[in-house]
Structures are given as structure tokens and as C-alpha cells.
């Protein structure tokens, strides 16, 4: 549906909502336009193209916020949404107030970041690239048996929000991604698996040689891997592994989680929780980010801020509801999920240090590098911070990356680990996360307990 027609429908929905008795109400529209192909054994095994258009309504009535979502855009849908949201208000009993918001100085918010390169994303381009990439992966080494998955996808779409207070908020974005994974047979008959990814906006900027080089390291570097002796080691969490590790506990910095008593960080804002050399910032308009975010889904402007500033827990992530409960202002982190307002970060940046990856190895001298963490759900207690994870990686020997290791378990506590950070590298990678990307380097820790050979 044309966005102008969507806006007409939403305007009518708001007008009828006010007549229906809602004190404040809001309508949001999102159109997720996407295309993807999967490559398997020299063929395009699947192809999908879709456009999912959804309008969500939320209205405040009798002290409660009611919600409803639809993919229909007619008079019957208006009636259905208002009745459903009103029924929600009648049965809900939430003591913490939600808000329909509009900043009088920022009523009309508009941010477009669609790229001219998006039109290059065609079935033929994707198929040609995917088939060539699969062939190239298989040609890397005779030990590589098969490409288990290879997906190329792109998406774009506008998002529009209007409310009865006068907010008119529009933003859009686009992008594409490539994910590939394969398996290989080691000399002892064991199977090793590995993969790599690429995200961007322009298919012509995909560097196949660079992609293949990293994928090759990720899988062939595991050949000959075996366990190591149990003990305490100096640890480097390689950039992607550190992102996975930190993300598993990131929810503990959400005010909504803290206020439910599900985070040990509740009441710790302004106190030291990590090493002096560790700073985690949210940079919504980060210049290196593919997608930037100047305002959230509640119409609150986003700002650059430190979440952890030189080891000090500077601020949690707040939306309007959790901020009101805490008696403070929103941090601009209210984003929709399934029509309801939740909490999410935009672009996150672990502030890099001066040393590259080799420099971290030299500083460690002896220790272990972890590159793959398994069981980040089953092996993690997000509340207590305790974890026990099956891992793969490499030894650090004489200040250099040594032989590969596997069949080891790393155990410890997230909060203790933050205090054991010795150095932060500068080998930053970016991975999609939240409402943006996570930019993180590798990180050196002073101590980790490893269970391997007895």
C-alpha cells in the first residue's frame, strides 16, 4: 500500500479513536519489503520476496494502554482495532503508566537513509553471486565437504508514526546481508564447521576475496584442534565472541529488567562495575553505522551517551514508561516490538584501545583465545551472571596465537569478568544488533577458568 494511503488510514484511525473515548492514541505503520535466496549444491534452493504491511494502534483509556495490530486497511479494521484496544484497557491492571508522547519542539520528525544501490538487488544478481561464492568456498580446500548454508538477503521499508498529540514521525532504511557456513573433515575424521557474514548497502562493495579469506581462517584454522589442560588462563575474547558474550547480559542494563528485580545492576547507576579501561557507548548517529537512528518509536530524540564509562555504570536504557517510574527522562530507547513499546539499544560501541589483536596476544604472553561460544542460552544465568559455556579457540603461546583448542568449557561470572578486563583492542567489527549494530573489538581478561583435559 502506498504510504500516503497508509497515512490517510492512520489519520482516520486516530480521529475515530478520540471519538471512541481514548484520552490519547497513536497509530504506526511499517512496510517490510524483503527478498532472499538460498544456495545449496549448485542451485538456488529457495527464493522469497515479500512485503509485510502492518498498522498498529495503541490507546490510553481508564488508566491503561490498549493495543491492537492489523494488516487490513478498511472501515471494518478501524472498528475492530478500536474495540480490541478498548477491551484491553478494561482488563489490564498495570500500575506503571504508559505514555503517548509528543515534544512540542519536535513534532515533525523525518529521517530517510535509503540508498541508491538498493535497486541493484535483483534475483539475477543474487543468484549469480551466490552460485559463484558457493563454488569459491568449495574450492578453498579439498577438506571442505559442503556448504551447509548460503543466504543472500535484502530489505527496506518505511516506518510512520502519528498520534493524537501531534507527533508525525517518519524514518526508513535499507540494507543487505550475506551469510555462509560450511563443514570440513579433519585428518582424524572429525568434522569441523565454520562460517562468515557480510552486511552492507551496496552489493558492488562486497569483497569476495576478503570474505573467503576470513571464512577460510574460521574453518581451516580449527584443523588439528584438541583440548587443553584444565586451569586458570589469561583470556582474549575475540571480537565476535566478545559481542556474543556481552549481548547475553546486555538486557541487565535495561531499566525495565532492573525494575522487575531481574538484574543485579538495579540501584548501581553511578557505581563502578567494570575495569577502568572499559567504556561502552551508545552512538545512535555513529558515522560508521549502516543505519542511524535520530529518534525512537516514542518520538523521543536519541542522544550519544556512555552506558559504562571507564568502568562506571553511567546509565541504564530507559523508555518513557520505565523513565517515569524512575523519576527521570527517557534515554530515547523506546522501540516497538509486536506493536507494544519495549526497550532496545541503537548503535553500540565498545571504545577501542590502542593495541591490535597481536598486541593483545603479546600482552597476555600465555593464555587462551576464545572464538566460538556455545550454549549462550542454556549455559547462562542472566540474573546472577554465572555462565558455563562450551568453547573453541586457540592457545596463546609465547605471546602469539598458537594451536587450536576445542572440547573445553569456560566458566565464571559476568560481573566478575567486567572487573578483570586488562586491555581493549582496536580490531573492531560490526554485527547487526538491537535497532542498529554492535561495534566491538577483542578484549583481554586477566583470568578465566577452563575445564579441559584432567
Image (spheres, helix red, strand yellow):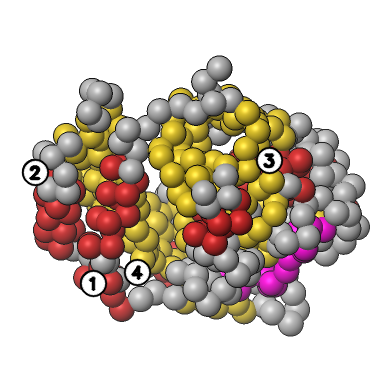
Is 110 one of the magenta-colored residues?
no
N-terminal of the pair, mark 4 or mark 3, is 4
Q: What stretch is highlighted in magenta?
A: 293-312
Kindly state the secondary structure of the residue where label 1 is placed: helix
SS assignment at label 3: strand
- Given the current orientation, which residue lies at the most extreme top position? 454
Q: Quadrant of the C terminus?
A: top right
Give me the residue at 74% from left, 65% from top.
306
Which quadrant is home to the N terminus? bottom left
Q: Where is residue 39 in the image (x, y as percent from the top left)?
A: 17, 45
Residue 20, percent across and down? 68, 53
The answer to the question of whether label 2 and label 1 lie on touching residues, with beta carbons closer than 8 A, is no
Residue pointed to by mark 3: 447
Q: Given the current orientation, which residue lies at the most extreme front position? A: 398
Q: Mark 2 points at which residue?
A: 42
CA distance for labels 1 and 4: 9 Å
Q: Is residue 335 left or right of residue 72?
A: right
Residue 57, relative to residue 296: is it above or below? above
The numbered mark at residue 204 is: 1
Amino acid at each position: 500500500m502506498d504510504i500516503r494511503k497508509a497515512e490517510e488510514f492512520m489519520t482516520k484511525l486516530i480521529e475515530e479513536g478520540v471519538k471512541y473515548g481514548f484520552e490519547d492514541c497513536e497509530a504506526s505503520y511499517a512496510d517490510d519489503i524483503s527478498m532472499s535466496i538460498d544456495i545449496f549444491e549448485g542451485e538456488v534452493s529457495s527464493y522469497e520476496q515479500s512485503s509485510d504491511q502492518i498498522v498498529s494502534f495503541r490507546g490510553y483509556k481508564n488508566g491503561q494502554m490498549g493495543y491492537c495490530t492489523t494488516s487490513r486497511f478498511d472501515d471494518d479494521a478501524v472498528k475492530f482495532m478500536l474495540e480490541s484496544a478498548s477491551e484491553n484497557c478494561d482488563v489490564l491492571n498495570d500500575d506503571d503508566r504508559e505514555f503517548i508522547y509528543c515534544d512540542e519542539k519536535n513534532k515533525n520528525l523525518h529521517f530517510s537513509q535509503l540508498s541508491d544501490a538498493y535497486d541493484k538487488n535483483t534475483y539475477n544478481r543474487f543468484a549469480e553471486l551466490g552460485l559463484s561464492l558457493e563454488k569459491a568456498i568449495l574450492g578453498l580446500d579439498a577438506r571442505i565437504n559442503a556448504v551447509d548454508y548460503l543466504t543472500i538477503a535484502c530489505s527496506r521499508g518505511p516506518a510512520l508514526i502519528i498520534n493524537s498529540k501531534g507527533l508525525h514521525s517518519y524514518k526508513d532504511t535499507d540494507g543487505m546481508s550475506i551469510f555462509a557456513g560450511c563443514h570440513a573433515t579433519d585428518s582424524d575424521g572429525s568434522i569441523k564447521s565454520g562460517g562468515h557474514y557480510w552486511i552492507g548497502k551496496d552489493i558492488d562493495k562486497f569483497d569476495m576475496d576478503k570474505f573467503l579469506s576470513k571464512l577460510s581462517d574460521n574453518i581451516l584454522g580449527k584443523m588439528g584442534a584438541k583440548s587443553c589442560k584444565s586451569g586458570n588462563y589469561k583470556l582474549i575474547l575475540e571480537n565476535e565472541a566478545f559481542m556474543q558474550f556481552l549481548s547475553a547480559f546486555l538486557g541487565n542494563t535495561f531499566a525495565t529488567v532492573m525494575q522487575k528485580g531481574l538484574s543485579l545492576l538495579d540501584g548501581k547507576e553511578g557505581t563502578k562495575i567494570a575495569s577502568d579501561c572499559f567504556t561502552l557507548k551508545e552512538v545512535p548517529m555513529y558515522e560508521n553505522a549502516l543505519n542511524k537512528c535520530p529518534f525512537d518509536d516514542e518520538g523521543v530524540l536519541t542522544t550519544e551517551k556512555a552506558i559504562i564509562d571507564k568502568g562506571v555504570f553511567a546509565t541504564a536504557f530507559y523508555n518513557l514508561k520505565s523513565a517515569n517510574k524512575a523519576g527521570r527522562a527517557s534515554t530515547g530507547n523506546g522501540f516497538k516490538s509486536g506493536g507494544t513499546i519495549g526497550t532496545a539499544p541503537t548503535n553500540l560501541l565498545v571504545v577501542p584501545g590502542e593495541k591490535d589483536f597481536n598486541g593483545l596476544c603479546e600482552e597476555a604472553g600465555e593464555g587462551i583465545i576464545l572464538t566460538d561460544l556455545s550454549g549462550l542460552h542454556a549455559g547462562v544465568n542472566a540474573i546472577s551472571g554465572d555462565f558455563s559455556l562450551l568453547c573453541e579457540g586457540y592457545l596463546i603461546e609465547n605471546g602469539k596465537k598458537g594451536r587450536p583448542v576445542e572440547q573445553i568449557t569456560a566458566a565464571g561470572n559476568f560481573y566478575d569478568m567486567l572487573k578483570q578486563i586488562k586491555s581493549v583492542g582496536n580490531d573492531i567489527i560490526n554485527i547487526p544488533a538491537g535497532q542498529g549494530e554492535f561495534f566491538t573489538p577483542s578484549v583481554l581478561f586477566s583470568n578465566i577458568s577452563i575445564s579441559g583435559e584432567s
